[in-house]
Amino acid sequence: MNDRSKPGHILPKMEAGMTSKNRLAAEIEEAIAIAQAGNMAEAEARLAEIARDPDAASLGHMTILGLPRKLHSARLKLAKLGGDVVAVTGLRATAVPPPELLAELLQPDPQTRAALAKAAGWPVPRIVHQIWIGGPVPPTCAIWRDWAACHGWEYRLWDEQSLAELAITDDPQWQAMIMARDYPGAVDVARYHVLLRDGGLYLDCDWYPVSPERPPEDFIPAIGLSAIAEAGPRLVAGGSVLLANGLIAVPPNHPAIAKLIDVLPQIAARLSGAPAWWQTGPLAFTLAARMGPVTILDPAIWTDRLPQRAPISQVIERVEAAKAKAAFVIEWKSW
C-alpha cells in the first residue's frame, strides 16, 4: 500500500472545468514535490499510477519509450533528483518521438543527396545574423555587432519589421507560432528563412563571446553546414546526436535548409502541441542537417551556462576562465 491509498490521503483537487490533462499535470507536480521531499519510492509509484490512467495520452505525444512526453519528462526529473546517472542518460536519450513518425519527411532522393554533397563545398558568406522579437534588445547584440565589424564581417539584427520585408510573415508555420505566442518557435522558423536567402553565421542572442579579439574563422569552417551538438546522446531517427540550432553556419540556398522550411508545417501537424524544440528547433533541424554532410563543431567551444539574469560581473569572470579553454561562447540570458 502506498500513501496514496491510505485513508486520509488527499488527491489533487479536481476543480470544476479542469481537464484530464490538467488533472494529470497536477498529479505529476505532486509526485515531483514528493521526490524533492525525499520520498523517491512514493514519487515513482505515483508516476506509475499516472501511466496507467486511461487519460494518460493527454500528456503529450509518445516518446520512443512509449511514454507521453510530459510523463517521460517527469521520470527524467526524478532520475536527476535521485542522482541516477544511468537513468538520466537513458531517459534523456529517448526523450524524442519515434523515428518512424517523421522519417519519410526528410528522406533525400538521389538528386537531393548529390546536391547536399556539393553544398558541403560552398562558401559561407561573412555575415552574422541575430533575431530579436519584442522587448528591449539584449546587450549581447551590440557586442556581437562590434565583433563582426572588427573582423570584417557584416552584422544584421532582424526584428519584426525587417522579417516582414523578407516575407517570412507569409510562412504558415511562422504564423502558427506567432498566433500561439510561441516566440522561440517563430524565431526558429525565421532563422531558417534568413539563412536560406543570405547564408552566413546565425547566433542566438543568449550567446556571449569569450574571445572577441579572435575572428569567426578561428572557430567556424568557411564552407558547408556547421553546428554544435547538444550535450549527451539523443536517439534521433537512428542516430545519437542532436544538433543545437542556436549556432548555424551555412551557405545560402543550402538544400537541407530549403527542405526543412518545406516540411516544417508537416512536422508541426504530426507533432501538434509538442514543444518548439521538437516541432521547429533542434529535432527538426537535426533531421534536415543529417540528410547530407555536416560539420559538428567541438562542444567545448560552448563552454559554460550562467544563471538567467546573472550580473555582468559574473559573466566577465566566467569569460576570463573560458579563454584558457579556447572557447567561443558562453550562454547568458540577460533578460
Image (cartoon, rainbow, N blue to C red):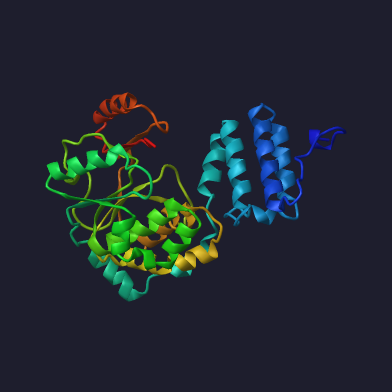
Is 179 positioned to the left or the right of 77 in the image? left
Tell me what residue is drawn at x 45 percent, y 58 percent: 178
* The quarter of the displayed image where residue 284 is located: bottom left
Above or below — where is 209 with respect to 280? above
Residue 237 seen: no
Q: In which quarter of the image is the N terminus?
A: top right
Q: Position of residue 63 (x, y in %)?
A: 58, 54
Is 257 positioned to the left or the right of 84 in the image? left
Q: Where is residue 131 in the image (x, y as percent from the top left)?
A: 32, 51
Above or below — where is 316 with respect to 54? above
Q: Tell which residue pokes out farthest to the right in this image.
A: 7
Q: How many labels does the image show?
A: 0
* The quarter of the displayed image where residue 149 is located: top left
Residue 285 seen: yes
Tell me what residue is drawn at x 76 percent, y 45 percent: 14
Q: Where is residue 182 in the image (x, y as percent from the top left)?
A: 47, 53
Is 202 positioned to the left or the right of 187 in the image? left
Q: In which quarter of the image is the C terminus?
A: top left
